[in-house]
Image: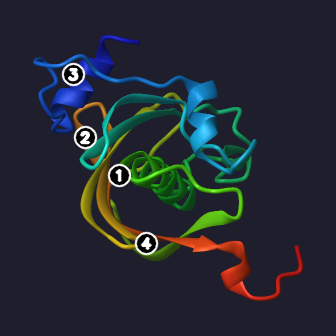
Amino acid sequence: MSTAVPQQRAQAGAVNAVERTPKTLGFTALKQWLRHRHPMIYLDRIVDHEPGKFLEALMSISGNLDCIAGHFPERAVYPASHLMQANAQAGIILYQMSTSMLAEDELTLISSVEARFLKVIVPGDQVLLRVQASRLAGGLFQFTGKAMVGSHRVAAFRASLVRSRVSDLGEQLW
């Protein structure tokens, strides 16, 4: 882990960053918490988490990402929609860690999202995403999030997720 990450975590408001040992998950372990697969997994590593409270994840931006190739060829910018999805994935993992893993016949749906994008993200940036649980009631999970690049906040989010059984969604053309 680079020396910039602990500093980023402190600036992102990490809970007791000095007093407790961070609980990390590598890429292979975090895939167990998501239904997404390549190329739709945006998170690279969980750098710390506490169920029911918060989760911090890293996402490294490479100029070789397919989404960068066409967005925009003359000046590469990481798409805001992908950053929203990364935030949702961090929220999905925190939701499951705070309750239970999804059953085989369950999935999560985003029921609402508010997002503010403050700065562009470019190849070479390492984004620290921090999501915090706001409310957990029944099948509804509300959380807030922010994305940091170094000491700069690049985005802020407020979102809610619901857990749903596939059979409750009605007939689907899978």
Residue 101 place in picture, x, y as percent: 54, 49
Q: Measured along the vertical axis of the image, is residue 53 above or below residue 106? A: above
Element on which disc 3 rests: helix
Residue 70 at what x, y percent from top left?
A: 73, 52
- The residue under label 1 is 119
Task: Report the residue at 75% width, 41% height from top.
Answer: 38
* Distance from Cα at disc 2 to Cα at disc 4: 34 Å
Q: Quadrant of the N terminus?
A: top left
How crowded is the residue under tag 2: few (<14 C-alpha within 10 Å), some, or many (20+)? Answer: some
Mark closest to the chain's N terminus, 2 or 4? 4
Please tell me whether residue 19 is drawn above or below residue 144 in the rendered image: above
Q: Identify residue for label 4.
A: 139
The kind of secondary structure element at disc 2 is strand
**Chain-order first, disc 4 or disc 3:** 3
Amino acid type at circle 3 is: Gln
Q: Where is residue 15 in the image (x, y as percent from the top left)?
A: 15, 34
Give the mark toward the camera: 4 or 3: 4
Q: Is residue 118 left or right of residue 18?
A: right
Residues packed near mark 4 inside 10 Å, few (<14), some (14 to 19) or many (20 plus): few
Tell which circle, 2 or 1, labels the residue nearer the N-terminal end. 1
